Amino acid sequence: RRTPAGELNWIFTAVTDAIAWATLPRDLFRRLFRQDMLLASLCRNFLLAQRVFARYDLHPTSSPPLPEAHGHPLWGAWDLAAEAILTQLAAAAPPPSRVPSAAAGDERGASGASPEGGAGLARPGGP
């Protein structure tokens, strides 16, 4: 929780665990979310996939089948937290630096034409 990404991950874990606790039978919740950390992470991301894919009328499947949780009211807490943290990051970020390109000082631009109307390049063997 020391970084914005860590805070966001902590909130994501809390929200998805609460959604799973509310929607799954207790024995299945313990098996999927408490016995193995890797499996728990996979199931949390599956819940997120359900939510994201539902917007496109797609429905991921799992074995064992998990109930639909994309409409759970706790997703609102996730939306609020994610928006708040992303807003803080955007406000704290320095403005993008403008690195002058090689052509920035050259008034000819991309076409190679000089402001006077000429090509700006000398032809070999001629003036």
Image (tube, helix red, strand yellow):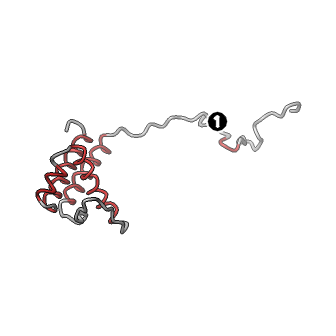
Say what amino acid the circle numbered 1 marks: Asp
- In the picture, the quarter occupied by the N terminus is top left
| Numbered circles on residues, count | 1
Which of the pair 111/58 is nearer the observer? 58
Which of the pair 80/18 is nearer the observer? 18
Which of the pair 105/34 is nearer the observer? 34
Left or right of residue 101: residue 111: right
Find residue 103 and report its horizontal and vertical position in percent: 62, 36
Dot 1, how many residues are within 10 Å of its Cα: few (below 14), some (14-19), or many (20+)? few
- For disc 1, the marked residue is 106
Find residue 87 and report its horizontal and vertical position in percent: 28, 48
Q: Residue furthest bottom?
A: 57
Q: Residue at x 23, y 45 (%)?
A: 9
Left or right of residue 17: residue 48: right
Find residue 30 and report its horizontal and vertical position in percent: 13, 52
Q: Residue furthest right?
A: 125
